[in-house]
Amino acid sequence: MAWAIENPAALGEALLRHMVLVGLALLISLAIALPLGIWSARRPRAYTAVLLATGLLYTVPALALFALLVPFMGLGTAPAVTAIVLYSLLVLTRNVAVGLQTLPGEVLEAADGMGYGRWRRLLAIELPLAAPVIVAGVRLTVVTQVSVATVGAFIGAGGLGDLIFQGITQDIGEKVLAGAVAASALAVLADEALRRLERRLAASQGGEP
């Protein structure tokens, strides 16, 4: 790890860039998946169609998806973030929909009996109760996003993948190792933080501690 010790600024810059890519993609993914999951949760046919469409996107190899996007969006951040978002929709949309679909019917009936309107019930009752399932989806999504963002360096998106590709090109094994270890550590830390949040939310609702 001598390269990382000798080049902390380069490693830190790549790590920050990687986190920005993942953070931006996650925000966009949630902005799409939340309403899509809510909408499809109440429509069985739409739910099936949404899962088929997002599942198809999820099966496309990362490099192939980048290759499809580059002619329309060029190189850099835009196609990388777009690809990361497309890979994220299946898990996020599915978990939002499943979280809402599996809520106890008596709880919803009680909310209706108390005069909750459709949107008030969604915001005050349904989404909070579905939060553990939704966070579980976010956890899986973030790990995937960290991985895909690494490949995004291939089309000029920067991040930790840049160190890996540069290290391979320059035949500097320690540079490759620094990028790989940093990307792995980022994924593990994000996974653990979100896992703890998921458990805390489940415990607050009387689930497993």
Image (cartoon, grey):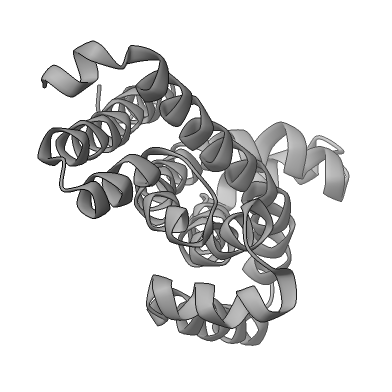
Which residue is located at x 64 percent, y 48 percent? 30
Q: From this view, report whether residue 70 is shown above or below residue 155.
A: below
Q: Position of residue 165 (x, y in %)?
A: 31, 52
On-image quarter of the N terminus: top left
Residue 153 as seen in the image, left or right of residue 109:
left
Which residue is located at x 15 percent, y 48 percent? 171
Q: Position of residue 49 (x, y in %)?
A: 60, 86
Residue 150 as seen in the image, left or right of residue 30:
left
Q: In the image shown, does 80 or 7 lie closer to the viewer?
A: 7
Residue 142 as seen in the image, left or right of residue 84:
left
Which residue is located at x 62 percent, y 74 percent? 70
| Total number of numbered discs in the rendering | 0
Residue 181, image quadrant: top left
Q: Position of residue 48 (x, y in %)?
A: 55, 84
- Residue 127: tell me if it is visible: yes
- Residue 200: tell me if it is visible: no
Q: In the image shown, does 11 or 80 lie closer to the viewer?
A: 11
On-image quarter of the C terminus: top left
Which residue is located at x 70 percent, y 64 percent? 36
Q: Position of residue 32 (x, y in %)?
A: 71, 57
Q: From this view, report whether residue 159 is shown above or below residue 81.
A: above
Q: In the image shown, does 195 or 164 lie closer to the viewer?
A: 164
Q: From this view, report whether residue 7 is shown above or below residue 153.
A: above
Residue 116, image quadrant: top right
